[in-house]
Amino acid sequence: MVLSRILFMRRKGIKALKFGETDKKDFLIPPFGLLYFYLILANAFNLPKLGFALFHNEMIRWVGAGLCILGLFLFLSALISFGMSLRVGIDKDHPGPLVTSGAFAISRNPLYIAFGLVLIGIFFIFPNSILFLYLIAGLWLLNRQVLREEDSLKKIYGEEYRSYCKKVRRYL
């Protein structure tokens, strides 16, 4: 969903991919993401696995599936709400207008909530020790990125963003 939006925006002359421009350590994330996808595929298709199962509960797996679906719908809703302001990374030079409507009227960070729901959901579906570590690290990284972006948004949008922060919660 994000890649198609980035390509669409590129055709409109907007450089939406700013990943790693603010903090070069961000480039450490993709290799861990690839391993994460392997872990999911290994569990789904009975490939060689890393780690060990923490529990087996069919009801929790269904809850996990529901969280993943909810996360994907929230993610799509947030992408639609973002419009042409979407950026992957922090864009200090050409930010779009501050988005405060749609999914952003409920939470200042609906994309990150969606990511968190999917991370939790995947762990519930495949309760593996390594995926549990990924869940903890992922939630920490999401919070770290939110805090970095909030600092940047305060500088870019000033009082408009501070006023928005008073009306809408960081998460839920």
Image (tube, helix red, strand yellow):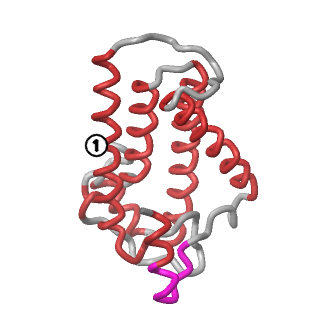
**Is residue 62 rendered magenta in the image?**
no
Question: Residue at 54% across / 24% down in the picture?
Answer: 132
Question: Residue at 54% across / 64% down in the picture?
Answer: 88
Q: Amino acid at mark 1?
A: Leu
Q: Position of residue 49 (x, y in %)?
A: 62, 24
From the viewer's side, name the closer residue of 146 and 121.
121
From the viewer's side, name the closer residue of 3 and 45.
45
**Where's the C terminus, which quadrant?**
top left
Q: Which residue is most to the front?
A: 46
Q: Is residue 19 left or right of residue 73?
A: right
Q: Position of residue 64 (x, y in %)?
A: 34, 29
- Please tell me whether mark 1 sits on a helix, a strand or a loop: helix
**Where's the N terminus, which quadrant?**
bottom left
Relative height, residue 63 to residue 71 (above, below): above
* Span shown in magenta: 8-16
Which residue does the numbered mark 1 point to in the structure image?
70
Q: Is residue 126 left or right of residue 144?
A: left
How busy is the neighbourhood of tag 1: few (under 14 within 10 Å), some, or many (20 plus)?
Answer: some
Relative height, residue 167 to residue 128 (above, below): below
Q: Is residue 57 left or right of residue 157?
A: left
Relative height, residue 109 to residue 22 (above, below): above
**Is residue 15 rendered magenta in the image?**
yes
Q: Position of residue 117 (x, y in %)?
A: 38, 38
Question: Residue at 46% across / 88% down in the picture?
Answer: 12
